[in-house]
Image: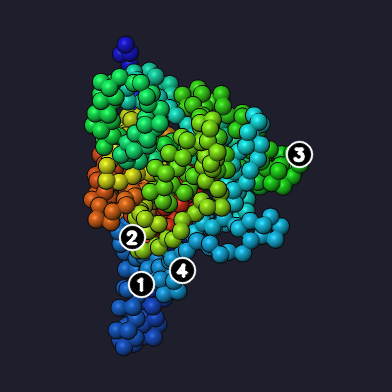
Amino acid sequence: MSTSTPITYGGWQSERSGFMGRLSGVGFALVAAGCVLLLTPLNLGSWIAAFVCVPIALLLFVLAFGRVLGLSADEWIVLAVRHQFAVATNRNTFMSGAFAPRSERTGQQPMDLPGVLARLRFLEAPDGLGGTLGISHDPVARTYTAVARITFPGLALVDTDRQTARVAAWAGFLRAYCTEDSPIVRIAVHQRCLPDDGAALRSWTDRHLAPDAPQAAVTALTELMEGAGPAATTRETYLSITLSAGKARLAINGAGGGQVGAAAVLVRELHAMHAALSSASLQVVEWLAPRALAQTVRTAYDPEAQLMLATRNAEAQSADWHGLEAGVDPQLAGPARTETDWGTYRHDGAWTVSYQVRTWPQADVYATFLQPLLRPRQNARRSLSIVYEPIGPRRARQDLAREKAKRESARKLRAKTGQDESEDERREALIARAQDAARASGQGVVRLTAVLAVTVTDLGELETACAELQADAAASGLELRRMWGAQDVGFAAAALPLGQGLPERRVGF
């Protein structure tokens, strides 16, 4: 038995992506306009101009510096106006194109996904092992994403030494892609926690129960399933790997170019990472084929389809099955109908609320600190997506130097004006220096975000499920923010294992 002291982890830093300091571009324009209005009465020497300009200037300052539920006032107004415009033009609703025109070349209907996912295409490529691989292609971002279903032994029931080794192996896996020439630009871990009433298990048992089974054994098995079924929970874990066609341009050209070359390079990268995944105790069950990838999307939009598809997939494994093959046709992956409200997202027969993790734990935590987030719940299904973006050494050096310079400048300015330095500011400066020292010693730097979603099939349970999720997040030391006005985008990032998230960073001055 290990007697080692458990290792704690911390040091997360929030990005400072304002146009000028912490001000966005709109906020900076509001402040500039407010300053001009304050100077106008002085230049004119008019009290009447002061009565007009000063209130307007104060309003502009409030819009620039005010906060509404974690957002600046100007950002809140932009979101509200955009949402109301979408509602007025009926762009917040989506209906699947059952009568969409078929392609003249293939004779098939195009994929029908809503919102930011409408541009995605599911491609099919050989996986190098005799099977097929499903690839999510984004022609706008020029990325190719493969998704694996994985299993892992967990951290809660192992000793400290094994916990430390597994976390270190995962860190080593991420660090391997923090290079200048790595074509992998995004790595995402997605986990779902699904309520399970045991219907699929009972269906499978009924089909495989021997006719001459002892009655006592049948009775005991029935009672066991009736008692355990309502408390059962299904967990699904996926790993998404995204390749950038721009960064892998030379390799893609060498592999034949186009989508075929990109798929070949991606498959080559997937094979190369198997050893690193195994060292992190991650077991790849399968790299999802197109129909399996489409099923993960379909069951997220329509939770009621989970049972039907699980039953059909189990039957498809039998030798005498002559029906549809396992999974879902990629053309049918999308929802029948969706509607985006200000704080919720309705899709088929379910409602989802998405949250972004805005603040990671301020204190050091153990490796198991995220466990409360996926605690089994019978009234809702939960999804968690953690998205990593590896950063090359040159850009990491620039970003960390910029962060240090910002903090040092702010500290010197406060010292000149006689203001006391808060403990939060002192701690952030220490973390920034520690991160730069770790980078200089060879450690990797990644951008990181986490998005959560809670889904219910009964609208009356939604707010209760949201309250439970926020309570569990607080127990993990996380601060969540509801993605007001962008619930459809949040759903795509949190509930689907397609590697969505992490927009381009806006670099400030």
The alpha-carbon separation of the residues under discs 4 and 3 comes to 43 Å
Q: Nearer the viewer, mark 3 or mark 1?
A: 3
- Sequence-wise, which precedes: disc 3 or disc 2? 3
The alpha-carbon separation of the residues under discs 2 and 4 comes to 16 Å
Disc 1 element: helix
The amino acid type of the residue labelled 1 equals Leu
* Residue 75 seen in this snapshot: no
Name the outermost residue toward the front: 212
The amino acid type of the residue labelled 2 equals Gly
Q: Residue at x 25, y 52 (%)?
A: 461
Q: Say which of 308 and 409 sits in front.
A: 308
The alpha-carbon separation of the residues under discs 3 and 1 comes to 55 Å
The alpha-carbon separation of the residues under discs 3 and 2 comes to 47 Å
Verify CB contact (< 8 Å) between mark 1 and mark 2: no
Verify CB contact (< 8 Å) between mark 3 and mark 2: no
| Residue under label 2 | 343
The alpha-carbon separation of the residues under discs 1 and 4 comes to 30 Å
The amino acid type of the residue labelled 4 equals Arg
Disc 3 element: helix
Q: Say which of 76 and 138 sits in front.
A: 138
Q: Nearer the viewer, mark 1 or mark 4?
A: 4
| Residue under label 3 | 254
| Residue under label 1 | 60
- Sequence-wise, which precedes: disc 3 or disc 1? 1
- Sequence-wise, which precedes: disc 4 or disc 3? 4
Image label count = 4
Give the number of the disc on residue 142: none
| Residue under label 4 | 91
Q: Residue at x 61, y 29 (%)?
A: 271
- Sequence-wise, which precedes: disc 1 or disc 4? 1
